[in-house]
Structure formats: structure tokens, C-alpha cells
Image (cartoon, rainbow, N blue to C red):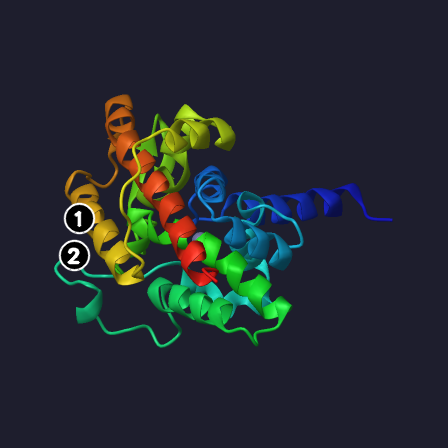
């Protein structure tokens, strides 16, 4: 029998692990992208995705890669979630992380999924990562600077509560307006569709253009105002919409036969 003290301690450890994940598009953002992609899949892509995921939806699996970050066996994939770029350099100009980055990881996932001889297990693993990482690369701070860990080390206040720039953009602005991913996804699905690139380097470039503006508009220890939240939600919505359309385009291309 565990002593009450031990139970409280265990609860604190577990809840810390759950709530202190610094480096994630909050759940809602990933789920929105999964839902928009699902609504834009070709019939064949839809069929193949269902088969590989045993019927699970893209939005359901979209957060799996972040949940796995607390599993030490998955720590080798931590660098897959982002790419740090100095503000005056683009992807082709930086020294590549030998452990991998979000661009390399997405290319790897696409390669495994295109390879007919990949096992179902391998395809499932890489499809779950692909869904997640296309979300991550569309969150501008995931292409942020190395020295502040993509804004994680820029401490500020969000409506009076201690936070950091990365978390504001991952989660807090979205959750200020919505906690229900389906309604946000449905709003965005009605938006005008845009042509998307199939090249992850282009997505990193677009996010990087945005992150430069985000850095220039923020001061450390600043209090994020309602005005800031309202102004920036439209950029987030654009990125989520583009992320969803991009994921669909990539999957339609992988499963085009
Ligand atoms: Zn992530």
C-alpha cells in the first residue's frame, strides 16, 4: 500500500511531466491540422492512412509524438520537432544538427511511407511523426533561435500569469479563443484554399519569416496583452490552415497510385 505522502509525490511528478511540456503546438493546434488534412485527402490516401493507423484519425494521432517525448526511449527523436535558425540565415545556410531536425525528419518520414517494402509498423511510426511534425514546422517558434530555445527561454506574462514566448504561440493564444479543435477546424475548412509547396525547406522558410517578426515585436518580461493575442490569432489560423492543406497534399502525393 502506498503512503498518502508517496501518492501526492507521485501525482506531482506525473502532473509535472504532463503540464510542463514546453515545446509543443498545444494539442488543439495539432488536432486542427489533422482534421483539416482529413477533409482534404484523396480517396486512396484516406484508405491507406486508415489502414496504416488501424482506423485511428489523423487528429487523434497528431499529438502522439509529443506524448512520447517523456519516454526515454524516444529522447533520440527530440531534435526532430524543430530547427533552430539564426534570424539572418535560412535553412540551406545553417550547420545541420547531426541528430536531425524537423526538415530532415519530415523527409525521412516521407521516404519511409513511399517505400513499398516498409513494414506496417515502420509506416505507422513515421506517419504519426509526419502528422505531428508538419504541425510543428508551421509553428513559427519551431524555427526560432538556438540561444533562447525557440522562445522557451523568453519569459513573459500571459494575462498576468508567468509564461514564455514559445508557450504563448504553441498553446495560449489558441486556447484563449477555443478549446474545441473541431469548431476551429470547421471554421478554417471554409477558408479560401491556397496552393502549398511539397518541400519542407519552403515551410521552414515561411515560418522563419514569421518568427523574425514575432521576435522583433516582443520584449522579455513583457505582459502579453489582449491586443497582442487578438492581432496574432489570424497568423496562427493561417498557419494551421496551411499546415492542414500541406499535410493533405503530402499524403495525397505519397499515396497517389
Ligand atoms: Zn512537437
Residue at horizontal 31%, vertical 38%?
A: 193
Label 2, secondary structure: give it.
Answer: loop
Does 54 sit left or right of 33 as displayed?
A: right
Q: Residue 2 location, x and y as percent?
A: 82, 48
The residue tagged 1 is 212
Tell me the distance, in whole angstroms, between the alpha carbons under discs 2 and 1.
6 Å
Label 1 CB sits under 8 Å from any ligand 1 atom = no
What residue is pinned by disc 2? 87
Q: Give the camera-side residue of 86 and 147.
A: 86
Task: Give residue 23's position: percent from left, percent from top.
Answer: 42, 51
Residue 6 vertical placement versus 163 (above, below): below
Q: Dots 2 and 1: beta carbons under 8 Å?
A: yes
Q: Residue, x 41% and y 38% (percent of image)?
A: 171
Residue 79 seen: no
Q: Residues within 10 Å of mark 2 (few under 14, many from 20)?
A: some
Residue 32's disc number: none
Residue 38: give x, y in percent of width and height. Answer: 50, 43
Relative to 111, is 228 on the left or the right? left
Amino acid at each position: 500500500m502506498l503512503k498518502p505522502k508517496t501518492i501526492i509525490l507521485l501525482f506531482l511528478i506525473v502532473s509535472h511531466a504532463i503540464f510542463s511540456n514546453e515545446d509543443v503546438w498545444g494539442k488543439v493546434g495539432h488536432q486542427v491540422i489533422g482534421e483539416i488534412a482529413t477533409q482534404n485527402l484523396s480517396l486512396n490516401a484516406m484508405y491507406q492512412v486508415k489502414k496504416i493507423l488501424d482506423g485511428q484519425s489523423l487528429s487523434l494521432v497528431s499529438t502522439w509524438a509529443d506524448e512520447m517525448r517523456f519516454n526515454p526511449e524516444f529522447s533520440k527523436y527530440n531534435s526532430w520537432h524543430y530547427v533552430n535558425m539564426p534570424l539572418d540565415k535560412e535553412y540551406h545556410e545553417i550547420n545541420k544538427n547531426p541528430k536531425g531536425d524537423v526538415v530532415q525528419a519530415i523527409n525521412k518520414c516521407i521516404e519511409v511511407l513511399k517505400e513499398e517494402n516498409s513494414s506496417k509498423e515502420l509506416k505507422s511510426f513515421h506517419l504519426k511523426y509526419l502528422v505531428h511534425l508538419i504541425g510543428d514546422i508551421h509553428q513559427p517558434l519551431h524555427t526560432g533561435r538556438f540561444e533562447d530555445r525557440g522562445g522557451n527561454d523568453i519569459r513573459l506574462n500571459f494575462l498576468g500569469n508567468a509564461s514564455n514566448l514559445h508557450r504563448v504561440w504553441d498553446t495560449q493564444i489558441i486556447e484563449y479563443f477555443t478549446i474545441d479543435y473541431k469548431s476551429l477546424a470547421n471554421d478554417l475548412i471554409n477558408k479560401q484554399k491556397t496552393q502549398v509547396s511539397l518541400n519542407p525547406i519552403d515551410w521552414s522558410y515561411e515560418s522563419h519569416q514569421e518568427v523574425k517578426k514575432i521576435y522583433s515585436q516582443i520584449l522579455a518580461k513583457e505582459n502579453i496583452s489582449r491586443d497582442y493575442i487578438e492581432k496574432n490569432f489570424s497568423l496562427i489560423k493561417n498557419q494551421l490552415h496551411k499546415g492542414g492543406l500541406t499535410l493533405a497534399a503530402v499524403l495525397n502525393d505519397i499515396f497517389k497510385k
